[in-house]
Image (spheres, helix red, strand yellow):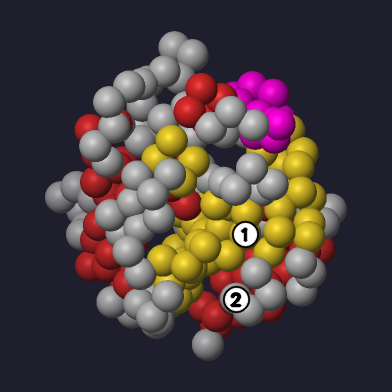
């Protein structure tokens, strides 16, 4: 998707003796916070954990993602968060997560499962938001492969999309602290949908500027 949008993707790993977060921030023009396993529950004050036998995100990645995101906040470079990327951004801003949506937020909405069932459901997009400008529609179908999600919204974050059960599906900064959009779904798996590719085009165009 980054290629299709006109960018060149570079894979980042947590720094060692060969580099630092500051050097990585300087070297790249945009940041893509990708999906992955659940964040460790002690990272946001959770108490229970169940991911069908899967291990939580490694602490090295948790810490690196936090550092590189906060480093980017100090620049005017764009950030796009996807799935676990959205959840991590919310936690960085002081928010919390539903540790298991099916048991903690019973509803008629099927949110799928990590590495399991892929669900499709509609989300309502805030027209007065950056996401609304990018998507240019108010109701869109999205894919869903997660059992966790935003419970308490982080400070200085604005919710910009919701599923019908009230779960926050997208956020962006409220006061211009950083330049980012984060979504709970996986736009990279909906490449045939120009609205979803628009998220990557936004990131690449902002990076060029």
Instruction: Judge the density around disc 1: few (<14), some (14-19), many (≥20) Cα neighbours within 10 Å.
Output: many
- Which quadrant would the N terminus be assigned to in this image? bottom right
Q: Which residue is mark 1?
A: 161
Query: How many labels were placed on the picture?
Result: 2
Contact? badges 2 and 1 (CB < 8 Å): no
Say what secondary structure mark 2 lies in. loop
Say what secondary structure mark 1 lies in. strand
**41 versus 63 height, above or below:** above
Magenta includes 123?
no
* Residue found 43% across the figure and 35% down from its top: 98
User: Residue 194 shows which numbered tag?
Assistant: none
The residue nearer to you, when weighing 72 against 135, is 135
- Tell me residue 83's x, y (percent): 53, 45
Q: CA distance from mark 2 to mark 1?
A: 9 Å
**Residue furthest to the bottom:** 209
**56 versus 84 height, above or below:** above
- Tell me residue 17's x, y (percent): 15, 50
* Residue found 24% across the figure and 37% down from its top: 45
Q: Which residue is mark 2?
A: 129
* Residue found 28% across the figure and 64% down from its top: 70
The residue nearer to you, when weighing 1 against 120, is 120
35 with respect to 164 (left or right)? left
Question: Magenta region's main secondary structure?
Answer: loop
Residue extent of the magenta highlight: 108-118
Lower position in the chain sequence, tag 2 or tag 1:
2
């Amino acid at each position: 998707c980054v290629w299709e949008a006109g960018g060149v993707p570079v894979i980042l790993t947590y720094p060692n003796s060969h580099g630092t977060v500051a050097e990585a921030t300087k070297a790249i023009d945009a940041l893509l916070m990708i999906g992955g396993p659940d964040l460790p529950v002690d990272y946001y004050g959770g108490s229970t954990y169940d991911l069908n036998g899967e291990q939580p995100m490694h602490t090295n990645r948790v810490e690196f993602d936090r550092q590189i995101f906060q480093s980017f906040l100090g620049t005017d470079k764009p950030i796009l968060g996807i799935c676990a990327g959205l959840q991590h951004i919310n936690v960085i801003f002081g928010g919390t997560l539903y540790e298991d949506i099916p048991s903690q937020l019973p509803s008629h909405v099927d949110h799928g499962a990590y590495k399991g069932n892929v669900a499709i459901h509609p989300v309502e997009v805030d027209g007065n938001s950056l996401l609304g400008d990018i998507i240019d529609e108010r109701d869109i179908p999205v894919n869903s492969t997660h059992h966790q999600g935003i419970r308490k919204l982080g400070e200085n974050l604005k919710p910009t999309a919701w599923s019908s059960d009230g779960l926050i599906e997208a956020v962006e900064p409220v006061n211009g602290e950083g330049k980012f959009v984060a979504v709970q779904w996986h736009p990279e798996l909906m490449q045939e949908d120009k609205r979803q590719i628009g998220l990557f085009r936004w990131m690449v165009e902002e990076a060029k500027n």
